[in-house]
Amino acid sequence: MLHRFKQGLAVSILLAVSGSVLAQQLPQLKPEEATRYRKAGYAFANRNMLKIKAMLDGSLPYNKDQVLAAATVINSTVNSGMGALYLPGTEKDIGSEKTRLKPEFFTQPDKVKEVAGACRTAGSKLATAAASSNQAQVRVAFDDMGKAGKGCHDAFRKD
Amino acid sequence: MLHRFKQGLAVSILLAVSGSVLAQQLPQLKPEEATRYRKAGYAFANRNMLKIKAMLDGSLPYNKDQVLAAATVINSTVNSGMGALYLPGTEKDIGSEKTRLKPEFFTQPDKVKEVAGACRTAGSKLATAAASSNQAQVRVAFDDMGKAGKGCHDAFRKD
């Protein structure tokens, strides 16, 4: 009974994180693969956030094509069904695959839904802003994406 | 003189890999960061290739939204300016950051240009096919993306 409850809770959380996407992929992934891909996706998204940041703060010349390319990586990542990569057990290190995910991720589905939804929306708005070539709009959307990411980290990442 | 030649060669290769994108970001990245982000980008792209593969081979139900989401990750990654992540020195392991990049990457600019261009084109075609919802077209584009990736690995990845 408890097992069934936990299964149901895990599915609820996955759907909250991923929207309707990819929850059925679960059986194909080993937990350590899920952790590895999850970290890879966020690391590469972060790399692209840093690119945009450098162009907004003047460290690099602003280039709308580069901003759009980076924003597209970020948006496509956060809207790719990341939820499928949060398998039960992946709040722990598995072999050499380390994680900072807090166990609370698997017990707070409403909070997961809130922060994951905020990230997906912010990604979408960032891509829209980047496509518009309006630098002021990009700046606002970039800051919102940063806040959305921080919201997720504050809730569910050990630091 | 040799140093200047090597610098010129490195820039040529970066431009070949990245198109015109992001070569000027070089000074901001440490070599080990470049390796880490490069591996992260390809790992997450590979995760998304495996998603599409599973939907094409019947392991998972074909879902055009999921295929498009995955194809968008792949295309945005290979067209994000990966060239900036091939810093001189990153053909070697740096601390805990391992790599399988062959040293030949930095001495064969024409081959780099060829395989990198093929990857960028294949990514773009995969995204177009996924957006079309034509499963036969997706299958062709997926196979071509796989071949393009293999072309890069055969030339420049130790296995």
Image (cartoon, coloured by chain):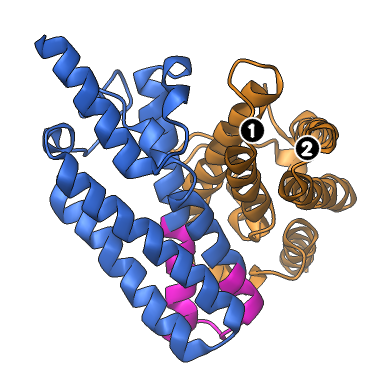
Chain colours: A orange, B blue
Residue A56 in percent (x, y) is at 71, 24
Q: Position of residue A1 (x, y in %)?
A: 78, 69
Q: Nearer the viewer, residue B16 or A125?
A: B16
**Mark 2 secondary-structure assignment:** helix
Residue B121 is inside the magenta segment:
no
The answer to which image quadrant residue B136 occupies is bottom left
Near mark 2 (Cα within 10 A), the count class, few <14, some 14-19 or many ≥20, is many
Residue B53 in magenta? yes
First to last magenta residue range: B46-68
Task: Tell me where residue B99 appears, x and y as whole percent.
Answer: 26, 34
Circle 1 SS class: helix
Q: Amino acid at mark 1?
A: Met
Whether residue B129 is situated above or below residue B145 in the rendered picture: below
Task: Work out which quarter of the rendered image holds the N terminus of chain B and state it.
Answer: top left
Chain of the residue where label 2 is placed in the rendered structure: A
Q: Nearer the viewer, residue A20 or A26?
A: A20
Amino acid, disc 2: Met
B94, above or below B83, in the image:
above
Location of residue B54 (image quadrant):
bottom left
Q: Position of residue B70 (x, y in %)?
A: 55, 65
For label 1, the residue is A49
Inspect this view and state whether residue A100 appears: yes
Residue drawn at x 15%, y 11% is B3
Q: Pointer 2: what residue?
A: A145
Image-quadrant location for residue B144: bottom left
Residue in the image at 39% along x and 27% along y: B34
